[in-house]
Image (cartoon, helix red, strand yellow):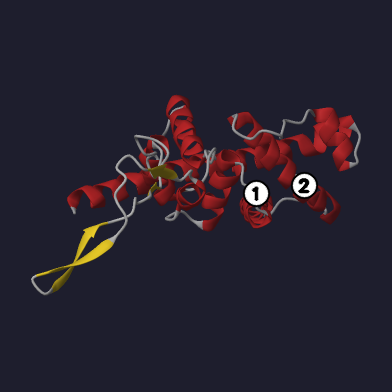
Amino acid sequence: MMNQQYIEYLRGCVSTALADRRSGKGQLDALNGSAMTRTTAHPRKRLRIVQLEGRNVCAATDAMHCTETRSRRKPMPPIDPITYGTASWRRALGHLEPHQEAWIRYCYGYDLNYDYQVMICQNVWNEYRATLTGKRTTEKARRRIESLVWLAVQSYAATCGFVEVLRKYNDSELAELSGVSKSTWSENYRHHWLGLIACVASLDSSALLTVKTMRSESRSVHLAT
């Protein structure tokens, strides 16, 4: 069981690993666009071919221009230290369940891929729908609850502190978005909303725990080889 402090640590690790740090050119692009330096410090005479013991020998050459492909004394590293140091976290994402990877990339990598959003919502709804089995819930109410899934995902992601444009919703806003009065919302839908939030929280903690586990296993394998 992870405490809140450890969850925040894992959140920081995965958000750092997924951060976009492409502030400069790529390695090949930088090579292609770098300034070409010409050096003529040691000019030589025009090329002459002379006979020496029956062989043609170059006696001298024209001045040669040496083109240098780097404009700095010390070349830039092919990968920055932070990107290199967090590679194990990114590798671990490949071992997650699709809906877990979708959540991590959406919430902590700010990846708005539509397929990720669909997978997240489907998982949260399937988890919560199972809790409605055997309960007296009308089809109209069920559809309203289902319409809250994406809002719950956005609201919880906003509490994690790594999604830039999303926010939490208050009861008045949720009632309006659901097309019911605030009193009806409080009496009939608020507990469903809290249940959906709990499902998203469970997805978050399970995904983070799986990332941590897969990273530890992957590092053990690499250190053993």
Q: Residue at x 86, y 35 (%)?
A: 175
**In-image side of 35 versus 169 (left or right):** left
Please tell me whether mark 1 sits on a helix, a strand or a loop: helix
**Residue ranking furthest to the top:** 5
Q: Residue at x 52, y 38 (%)?
A: 21
- Horizontal and vertical percent position of residue 149: 72, 46
Mark 1: few/some/many CA within 10 Å (<14, 14-19, 20+): many
**In-image side of 167 versus 212 (left or right):** right
Residue situated in front as seen by the camera: 35 or 14: 35
Can you tell which quarter of the image residue 213 is in?
top left
- Horizontal and vertical percent position of residue 198: 61, 38
Three-letter residue code for mark 2: Ile
- Horizontal and vertical percent position of residue 97: 49, 56
Three-letter residue code for mark 1: Tyr
Q: Are marks 2 and 1 in contact (CB under 8 Å)?
A: yes
User: Looking at the figure, which quarter contains the C terminus?
Assistant: bottom left
**Residue 137 visible:** no
**Residue 223 visible:** yes
**In-image side of 120 versus 58 (left or right):** right
Please tell me whether mark 2 sits on a helix, a strand or a loop: helix
Residue situated in front as seen by the camera: 128 or 52: 52
Residue situated in front as seen by the camera: 127 or 11: 11
- Horizontal and vertical percent position of residue 128: 65, 49
Residue situated in front as seen by the camera: 178 or 209: 209
**Residue ranking furthest to the bottom:** 54
Residue highlighted by disc 2: 145
Choose the circle earlier in sequence order: 2 or 1: 1
Residue highlighted by disc 1: 128
